[in-house]
Structure formats: structure tokens, C-alpha cells
Amino acid sequence: MSLIRLIQESGAGKERPFFCLKSLDYEMENMKQIIKEKNVVLQNNNEKIHELENYVSELQEQCMTLQNQLQAVTASESSKLQDQLNQFEEYCQIPDIINNYEDLIKQMATNYETIKEERNVANVHLANLETGFADLISKYERLKGILNGYQQNQEALLNQIDMYKNVVIELQERYENFKKYANDKLNQANAHVEKIDKKHISELAKVKSKVLQSKVKISELQKTISLMSANGSTGDAGPDLNKKSVFAPLTHFSYR
């Protein structure tokens, strides 16, 4: 379940900004790689389960064979004993049979013990097979549970991948909208700056023109003052000196 927890933790970043797209793509690639690895594990587990099922089938066949052999041995020995008893009854009057009666009884007892031992060995072997079969069944059920868990994890991972795809699509749409909005605002700002620059250039040209005019006026005034100083009189300065001042403000100029 650690994979689901990792996906849930990574899914907490659903509201990330658009600049996390590369990180989401990387996480999606990791998820795909994990799913690919889990598919390989599932395939290997399916093969192991198939082998276990074959082995269980073989054990069942062996159990049936042993049971049949045990029944066959018991029936065969019982039949032999019955035949020997019948022969003994038929020839019980014969002196030779009477002389061999004790040997026959001993042989029958020996055969009975042998059959009993073989039956006990077969029962022990059958019990071992049943124990092994039960262990295989428990392992099969455990592997089946693990396989179901892997399948559930795979479904959860696929659902998370679909969710991430939707998130990526939504983020891409938001990114495109924001990009369009930013480009529109940037174009408006550039147009406004260009308009202001043109206005400032026009005003600067006007200021330069006024400065040049002022310099010309200052030069003319300096020449007039020099003439006035040379003549020693202020009455002959000319009509411009009485009408204009050096510190007169410039007209048609606006400050920004």
C-alpha cells in the first residue's frame, strides 16, 4: 500500500502552478514505470501459481494412486489368505497338509505383519502428502491474495494517472490563458510606453528649441549690454531691452 500512499501524497499537489508541468510529467513517467514493473511481477506470480496448481494436481493423482495401491494390496492379500484357507479346508484331511499346518500359520502371520507394515508406511506417506497438499493450498491462497492486492494497486495507479492527465490538461489550459493575458498586457504596455516616448521626444524637441532661442536672446542681450557699457548710457540700448527681460519665462512649454 506504500505505492497508493505515494500517489496520494503526490496527488496533494493538484493546485500547483503551471510551472510544475515538468515535475508532473516526470511523476507520470515514474508511475508508468512502476506499473510496468508490477505487471512483470504479476506475470511471474501467475506463472508460479500455474506451476503450483500443476504440482497440486500431480499430488492429487499420487494420492489416488497410493489409495488404489493400498486397496489393491489389501484385497489381494485377503484373497490369497482366503484361497489358502480354502485349500487348507480341502486338504485338511491329508497328513502332509497337517504336518505343514504350523508352517502355513507362521507364513500367514508373517504375511499379515508385512501387509500391516506396508499399510502403515502407505498411511504415513499419505498423511505427508496431505500435509504438503494443505501447505500448497495455503501458499496458493496467500499468493492469490497478493495478486488481488497488486491488481487493486494497479487500478488505483491507473486512476491516479487519469487524474494527473486531467490536471495536466487543466494546467495547460490555464497556462495558455495566462500566456495570452500576459501577451495582451505586454502589448498594451509597449504601446503605452511607445506613446509616452513619442510624447517625451516631442516635448524634448520643443525644450531644445526654446533653449536655443534663449541662447540667441542671451547672446543678443550680451551684445546690447556691451554696447551700453561702451556708450555709457542706458537710453540708447534699443527698443528690445525695454520690452524683454533675460529672466522672462519660456512660452509653450509644459512640465511633466
Image (tube, grey):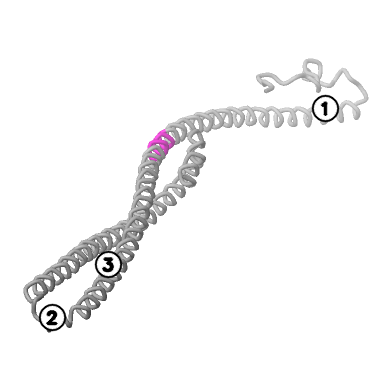
Please indicate whether residue 45 sits to the left or right of residue 81 in the image: right
Above or below: residue 222 compared with residue 6: above
Part of the protein shown in magenta: 165-173
- The three-letter code of the residue at mark 2 reads Ile
The crowd level at tag 1 (other Cα within 10 Å; few <14, some 14-19, many 20+) is some
Q: Which residue is mark 3?
A: 119
Percent x, y for residue 198? 56, 30
Mark-to-mark CA distance, 3 and 1 = 151 Å
Residue in the picture at 78% in, 15% down: 243
Checking the image for residue 60, the label placed there is: none
Mark-to-mark CA distance, 3 and 2 = 30 Å
Q: Which residue is mark 1?
A: 224
**Mark toward the start of the polypeptide (3 vs 1):** 3
Query: What is the quadrant of the C terminus in the image?
Result: top right
Residue closest to the eye, 174 or 30: 30
Instruction: Give the mark toward the camera: 3 or 2.
Output: 2
Q: Which residue is mark 2?
A: 97
- The three-letter code of the residue at mark 1 reads Thr
Is most of the magenta stretch helix, strand or loop? Answer: helix
Residue closest to the eye, 146 or 156: 146
Percent x, y for residue 189? 53, 30
> Which residue is most to the right?
232
Residue in the picture at 87% in, 30% down: 226
**Mark toward the start of the polypeptide (1 vs 2):** 2
Mark-to-mark CA distance, 1 and 2 = 180 Å
Instruction: Give the mark toward the camera: 1 or 2.
Output: 2
- SS at circle 2: helix
**Mark toward the start of the polypeptide (3 vs 2):** 2
